[in-house]
Image (cartoon, grey):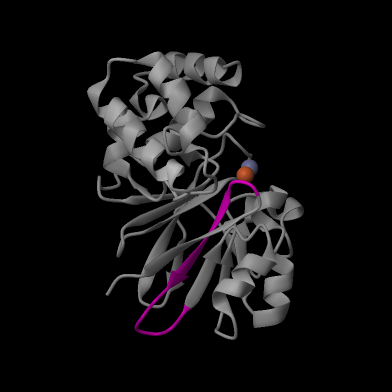
Amino acid sequence: MSLEIKAIPFARDNYAWLLKDPQTGTVAVVDPGESGPVMNAIGEGRLDLILLTHHHDDHIGGAEALRQKYGARIAGAEADQARLPPLDLLLHDEDRIAIGHDLGEVIATPGHARGHIAFYFRSVPALFCGDTLFSLGCGRLLEGTAQELFDSLKRFAPLPDETLVCCGHEYTESNAAFALAQTPDDAALKQRVADVKALCAENRATVPVRLGVERQTNPFLKARDVAEFAALRHAKDNF
Ligand code: ZN
Ligand code: FE
């Protein structure tokens, strides 16, 4: 049986993600930037684990309050330990982390933040990628190079097309405008943008999205080399 996944929207455009193993009842949350919306989702249920992708406040802000209420353990990158809440589990590239019967894989994805990590759970399959990969976009290079983020995105290359991309923000509609400006005649992209606009018009989430759809439509995943990737990132920053 695979993990059950639920998006918890909060703030203006953030997502935390709830993961539940239906067999053991184990529950984890990824990137609880605020505790209130997560508590509303869990209620008097349990929370075992808090997974943090990176140190920005909109991803960690609710972690401490959730640990105190539910006794959950907090897991994050040892590399960024100094900027994260006190960690119960120190994570490194290629570590495994158990949620019930599923063993998630830790993937180091520097670029947006030095110690950024992503989590991949193959039973779903789902990728929790924080601010590394967004639907039709990617994270800003706040403290890394284009080469680092390009290499980080390449780490997702072995993952299957059906992987659900569970990212940290609902940025898809604005990303779509940039993507379409790059390749206005791309049929797959035009279809994705139409789907996104329809979802947004009904105030519905555009994520998770299948990684295969992103591979077909996300200009940053389609960049052939780091020079092309860097030029795209630069153009997007000034779009
Ligand atoms: Zn961030
Ligand atoms: Fe963020």
Q: Nearer the viewer, residue 204 or 218?
A: 204
Q: Quadrant of the C terminus?
A: top right
Nearer to the camera, 199 or 154? 199
**Is residue 216 depicted above or below 204 in this figure?**
above
Figure quadrant of residue 238: top right
Q: Position of residue 15 (x, y in %)?
A: 55, 54
In the rendered view, does 165 fall on the left or right side of 9? Answer: left
State which quadrant residue 192 falls in.
top left
Q: Residue at x 44, y 54 (%)?
A: 94
Q: Position of residue 184 (x, y in %)?
A: 34, 15
**Magenta span includes 22:** yes
Farthest residue to the front: give it. Answer: 202
- Which quadrant of the picture is home to ligand 1? top right
* Residue 44 placement (x, y as % from top left): 59, 86
**Residue at figure coordinates x 72%, y 58% from the top left:** 61
Q: Which residues are magenta?
A: 12-26
| The N terminus sits in image quarter | bottom left
